[in-house]
Amino acid sequence: MTDASLNQANRSLTRQLWIFAAGSFAFGFALVPLYNVICDVTGYGDRTKLVQASTFTAPEDVNRTVTIELMGDAPSIGDWEFRPEVGSIEVHPGKLTEAKFYARNLRSQAVVAQAIPSIAPLQATKYFHKTECFCFTPQPFDAQQERELTVRFIVDPKLPVNIDRLTLSYVMYDAKSTS
Amino acid sequence: MAHAHDAHAAHDHHDDHGPAKGIGRWLFATNHKDIGTMYMLFSLLMFFIGGAMAMIIRAELFKPGMQLVDPIFFNQMTTMHALIMIFGAVMPAFVGLANWMIPLQVGAPDMALPRMNNFSFWILPFAFTMLIGTLFVPGGAPAGGWTMYPPLSQQTGEAFPMLIFAVHLMGASSIMGAINVIVTIMNMRAPGMSLLKMPIFVWTWLITAYLLIAVMPVLAGAVTMLLTDHYFGTTFFEAAGGGDPVMFQHIFWFFGHPEVYIMILPAFGIISEIIPTFSRKPLFGYDAMVYATASIAFLSFIVWAHHMFTVGMPLAGQMFFMLATMLIAVPTGVKVFNWTATMFKGSLSFEPPMLFAISFLFLFTIGGFSGLMLAIVPADFQYHDTYFVVAHFHYVLVPGAVFSLMAAAYYWLPKWTGHMYNMKLAKAHFWLSTIFVNVLFFPQHFLGLAGMPRRIPDYSTQFADWNMISSIGGFGFGLSQLLFAYIVFACIRGGEKATDKVWDSGRPQGLEWTLSSPPPYHSFETAPEVK
């Protein structure tokens, strides 16, 4: 190869490789929507399912009992007191059940809170229907105000038989940090 | 040497000049040999800085209870040790080797893009000054682990943006280095050198360079998302805004697993060069080696989630990632068997590079097997985040990648400097390293299986004995490396004159051995003919 044609070849290959690198950078960001699509398709930890009310009804299966463990956390100490009123409840699939959480704003100014739910194990997410939940909307609190928050839910009788215990957990964030 | 230099000058149409004088030779270096030297000396420095951090970790873990450092500083040490060793020691050392050896092995006068080569090296001192500088800012260095998982990494103090930008710079440096390697290999091979006639080290680097371009930008994207979450109100990984911290782990390990092979494929190339030389036989199964390397590179993209089995994923996902991971054992096994077959009935001799290569073969395989154990999902639930994982990846990285680098240094150092090094000391360095590396890391398997978690400064007294042994191995290994530095610098300063072939006996093969030792500053200005 002559010097000129080698320089030309080097330049063109270099350009292609930079485009490849730029494509990889874009691919990193494309993984974000891709990840959400996979969660939606499989129903694992499905975000829309977790934060939207559903109108589910099914006959109660009195022969089966599922233990629901309840958890309430705040991301940093000193902002919130937030806990379930009971640690766990036993329910029959198909039965509408109510659980209550206690929340108190520990700060001396008003705050709007947003609770973020999650369910473990993840594969139970699509069988857990919330008809009403304090996590569907932001919750305003006055300074030092304490409130009782309610969630109503039905466990789908189609819940896989190997699951007899699931955890419903909420983390209480300040809504100002939500987008 | 003078004679060879004159012979080259006769063919030269450009200004033929030796190295520039003074510091300018290094600051404005465009010569692949100078840049390769700087890369390797830089990585040696980082190896000792990262090693000093490891000594602090092992000193704290020498006995149960808190003795020397506070827990936050301990966590800073584990985090910084990993970042410095991966991005500062192992990766630049391989890039330095690529700079030195690829033009010599393919018969090119220099790297294809010498100015970019200079830039990609000189970014590194800035990146690592910034990274190491985090130790001195309020809040201290990053302490949430080198994987930078949110939300923990978001609690890093003022070091946070420095960490992110240091990672960006390292990534930019690696990408430019990789582009240079690919362009050199694709466009500048000597006439007659078809792809399947290339030395195996060149092949492994070609594939590694593609891996780098494919995944370093993904890491850059992931840390950019951390940065915008921290300062610009995005919520990629913040549950409060609808994001998901687990998604960071998926993106990170999509980079992280190919990164593992970025650090081991060039090592495979080095071992594949050294074993034939000292077995006095051609490499067994050259084509199989090339295809095995390519298969490992491909598989590295579809196994990332085995780093995060415990975060919760569908059973089908766990099965897929488990089986794909185990599949990697097949091409890796091909390589191990080919090296063994190369030695079989060979006329072996045991110079320092060969000793390190054989040690690599044994000890890397141990690390490979513990990797297979970790690939088994139900077993991984027990091993996850224990010292078993620490033992596994140190076996593949220290007696794996690092030993291959030492083997490469001992193999090519006489070619680079023109001097033989002190063989007795080098063999002593080998035995000290091999014994202490096992004293250091083998007990960590037991600790992990017994349930000792990683990244903790204190532990239950039941783990005391093996930790003490491991620490003794650590101090021994660390001190032994001072001997390595001494041997290298003594060899640069002088020593018995090396012949062109360096290692007598008809072997070694390859264009680099047709040049004088040391090679002229400008080599292969007229391309050699390869038959």
Image: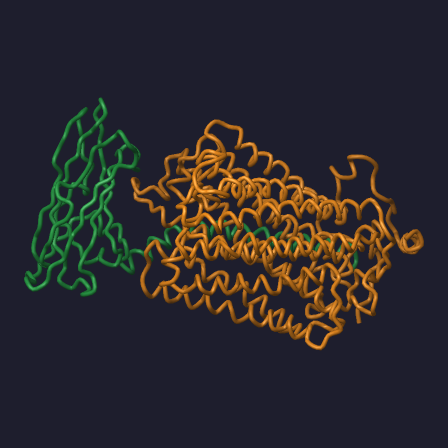
Chain colours: A green, B orange
Quarter of the image for residue B19 reads top right
* Image position of B359 with respect to A100: above or below: below
- Is B52 displayed left or right of B30 in the figure? left
Q: Nearer the viewer, residue B374 or B198?
A: B374
**Residue B520 x, y percent position in the rendering:** 85, 52
Relative image position of residue B13 (x, y in whole percent): 88, 51
Position of residue B420 in the picture relative to residue B175 (left or right):
right
Say how many tags the image has: 0
Left or right: where B495 falls relative to B158: right
From this view, report whether residue A100 is shown above or below residue B330.
Answer: above
Location of residue B129 with respect to B250 vertically, above or below: above
Expressed as whole percent of the image width and height from the top left, the position of residue B384 reads 40, 55
Q: Nearer the viewer, residue A154 or A88?
A: A88
Residue B312 sits in quarter: bottom left
Q: Nearer the viewer, residue A175 or B256?
A: B256
The residue lying at 78 percent from left, 67 percent from top is B509
Q: Residue at x 88, y 47 (%)?
A: B16
* Residue A42 point in image, percent of width and height: 29, 60
Q: Residue furthest top?
A: A108
Q: Residue at x 80, y 72 (%)?
A: B531
Q: Residue at x 86, y 44 (%)?
A: B18
User: Which residue is more in the foreground, B134 or B278?
Assistant: B278
